[in-house]
Image (cartoon, helix red, strand yellow):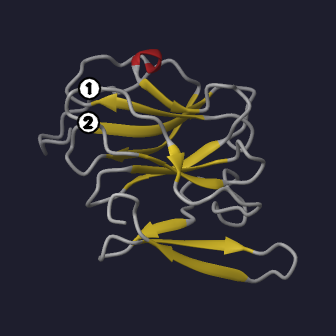
Amino acid sequence: ALDGSGTMQVLATGADFYAAPRVSPDGAYLAYVCWDHPSMPWDATEVRLAALADAAVSTADHALVDGADGDTSVLQPAWHPSSGALYYISDASGFYNLKRLPPLPKDGSEVKPVDALPPDDVDFGGSSPGWALGQQGYAFLANGQVAAHVPDRATGRSTLLVFDDAADA
């Protein structure tokens, strides 16, 4: 339990696999990745959001952020610590580009994910996104900026990018 009591509670059911649970900075939401057999994480996954105050445990009842087409791999969710935006990577373009879901409005109105950076023919997910759980190809710096490494497959070198969170820009 998030209250420190040690009580266990099922938060999501219905998918075959779950990974990368991340609680929002305000403690209101849980973002997670899920997928069904026979897909692998690099084939087809979904990023979903569950309101922690809500009793719904069925994955189908949780908000689908990305991956609805059944052919997109979405991985590595992480909440920006100061803006509350949800970042993740998506291979919808053919490369693992960084996406950003703006902070959720308190009035419950819908928001749509946007590109955190202009889409490019580079992978933000690291050397093998989805092949091993727990990888993270980007991080949030203490000043609110986002740092991401981008491998250059032609040279084998990596480039470190540092940019402002859209809410801070």
In this view, the residue in front, 83 or 13, is 83
> What secondary structure is marked by label 2?
loop
User: Which residue is rendered at x = 66% and y = 65% of the image?
Assistant: 126
User: Which residue is rendered at x = 40% and y = 59% of the image?
Assistant: 166
Please, is residue 95 above or below residue 30 in the view?
below
Quadrant (top left, top right, bottom left, bottom right) of the N terminus: top left
- Neighbor class of circle 2 (other Cα within 10 Å; few <14, some 14-19, many 20+) is few
> Could you tell me how far apart the alpha carbons at marks 1 and 2 are, in whole angstroms?
6 Å
Please, is residue 110 above or below residue 72 in the view?
above
Measured from the top left, where is residue 148 in percent x and y? Answer: 55, 71
Label at residue 108: 1
Q: Amino acid at mark 2?
A: Pro
Query: Farthest right residue?
Result: 154
Number of marks present in the image shown: 2
User: Which residue is rendered at x = 19% and y = 34% of the image?
Assistant: 7
Q: Amino acid at mark 1?
A: Gly
Left or right side of 80 for 100: right
> What secondary structure is marked by label 1?
loop
Q: Quadrant of residue 59?
A: top left
In this view, the residue in front, 37 or 96, is 96
User: To which residue does mark 2 refer?
Assistant: 105
Quadrant (top left, top right, bottom left, bottom right) of the C terminus: bottom left
Measured from the top left, where is residue 96 in percent x and y? Answer: 68, 54
- Mark 1 and mark 2 residues within 8 Å of each other at the beta carbon: yes
